[in-house]
Image: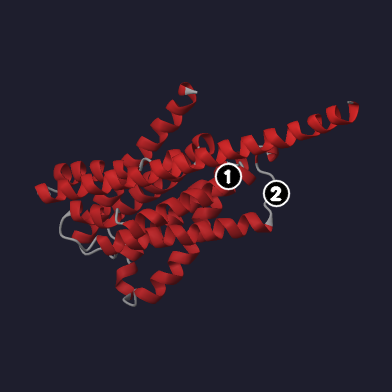
């Protein structure tokens, strides 16, 4: 069992490091007045295009036909991701990356993260082709974010690309923080389940605080540390309680099944006597 957990553990740690780097890169691009919504649209579109050729390399047996219900679940999952990215953009207005990360870890954001993880687990259970599910999730996210950005960003000049931190942020987001991270998270959920992967949410705070101090020169305050500790402890407390509740439900279900299996045997013995 331990060996089965090691690979998803490494995968989720890598995913959190990539996402922490994403918040640093987004903050740096925003400091140079690059529009955050435009950045997200371009990075998602590039991620979708990068992943498309690999779908044709997959054997037919590894990419079965998608059902309408699976596509609907992927569309819903993309909507959760849209809310998640919007939270990052709103929090990006904070002066310190530490404060942005704490905002990102507030209860409504954490609930959204857990909801996404459980929907993702349901999708990958019914359709285990990781690369295909990630591709359609990125495709739907691109469409949704494009509609949102076209409404929110009216300045045409904001969509022009230049050789600056904004372009660097787009490539980092597309390759590392989106495509690679999505593949790692989806694969880890498939291997270890949604509860296991949700436990890595607080690690994002630690990595982001460290990267903000190293690469952006953010100040580190004691209040931010105390707030981070409270959020981490609270999150793990909720997850521990939820896991314990699910374990009790599994035990009760096993007892019920055992009772149902023994009932016919007792009835047969009574007839024999």
What residue is at 21 percent from the left and 44 percent from the top? 229
Seen from this angle, which residue lies furthest right?
272
What residue is at 40 percent from the left and 73 percent from the top? 150
What residue is at 39 percent from the left and 31 percent from the top? 10
Viewer-nearest residue: 201 or 56? 201
Q: Is residue 10 above or below residue 30?
A: above
Q: Is residue 165 above or below residue 209?
A: below
Q: Which element is circle 2 on?
A: loop
Quarter where residue 62 is shown: top right
Total numbered circles: 2
Q: Is residue 87 visible?
A: yes
Say if mark 2 contacts mark 1, CB within 8 Å.
no
Q: Nearer the viewer, mark 2 or mark 1?
A: 1
Q: Is residue 250 left or right of residue 157?
A: right
The residue identified by callout 1 is 124
The residue identified by callout 2 is 65
Q: Is residue 12 left or right of residue 269?
A: left
Relative image position of residue 74 (x, y in whole percent):
56, 56
Relative image position of residue 170 (x, y in whole percent):
34, 54
Q: Residues within 10 Å of mark 2 (few under 14, many from 20)?
A: few
Which of the two discs, 2 and 1, labels the residue nearer the N terminus?
A: 2
Between the C-alphas of marks 2 and 1, the distance is 14 Å
Q: Is residue 110 above or below residue 11?
A: below
Relative image position of residue 37 (x, y in whole percent):
34, 65
Q: Is residue 220 visible?
A: no
Viewer-nearest residue: 57 or 129? 129
What residue is at 84 percent from the left and 27 percent from the top? 269
- The color scheme shown is secondary structure
Q: Which element is circle 1 on?
A: helix
Quarter where residue 106 is shown: bottom left
Relative image position of residue 118 (x, y in whole percent):
50, 49
């Amino acid at each position: 069992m331990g060996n089965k957990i090691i690979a998803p553990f490494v995968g989720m740690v890598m995913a959190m490091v990539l996402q922490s780097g994403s918040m640093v890169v987004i903050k740096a691009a925003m400091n140079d007045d690059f529009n955050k919504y435009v950045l997200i649209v371009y990075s998602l579109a590039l991620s979708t295009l990068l992943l498309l050729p690999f779908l044709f390399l997959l054997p037919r047996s590894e990419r079965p036909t998608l059902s309408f219900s699976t596509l609907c679940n992927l569309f819903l999952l993309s909507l959760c991701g849209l809310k998640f990215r919007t939270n990052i953009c709103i929090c990006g207005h904070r002066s310190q990356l530490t404060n942005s990360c704490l905002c990102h870890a507030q209860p409504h954001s954490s609930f959204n993260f857990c909801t996404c993880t459980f929907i993702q687990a349901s999708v990958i259970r019914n359709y285990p082709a990781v690369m295909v599910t990630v591709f359609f999730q990125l495709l739907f996210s691109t469409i949704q974010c494009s509609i949102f950005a076209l409404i929110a960003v009216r300045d045409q000049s904001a969509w022009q690309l230049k050789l600056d931190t904004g372009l660097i942020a787009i490539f980092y987001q597309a390759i590392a923080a989106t495509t690679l991270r999505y593949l790692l998270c989806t694969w880890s959920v498939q291997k270890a389940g949604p509860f296991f992967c949700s436990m890595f949410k607080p690690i994002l705070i630690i990595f982001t605080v460290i990267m903000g101090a190293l690469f952006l020169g953010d100040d580190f305050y004691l209040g931010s540390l105390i707030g981070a500790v409270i959020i981490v402890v609270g999150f793990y407390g909720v997850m521990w309680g939820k896991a314990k509740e699910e374990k009790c439900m599994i035990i009760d279900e096993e007892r019920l099944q055992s009772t149902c299996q023994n009932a016919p045997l007792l009835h047969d013995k009574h007839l024999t006597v």
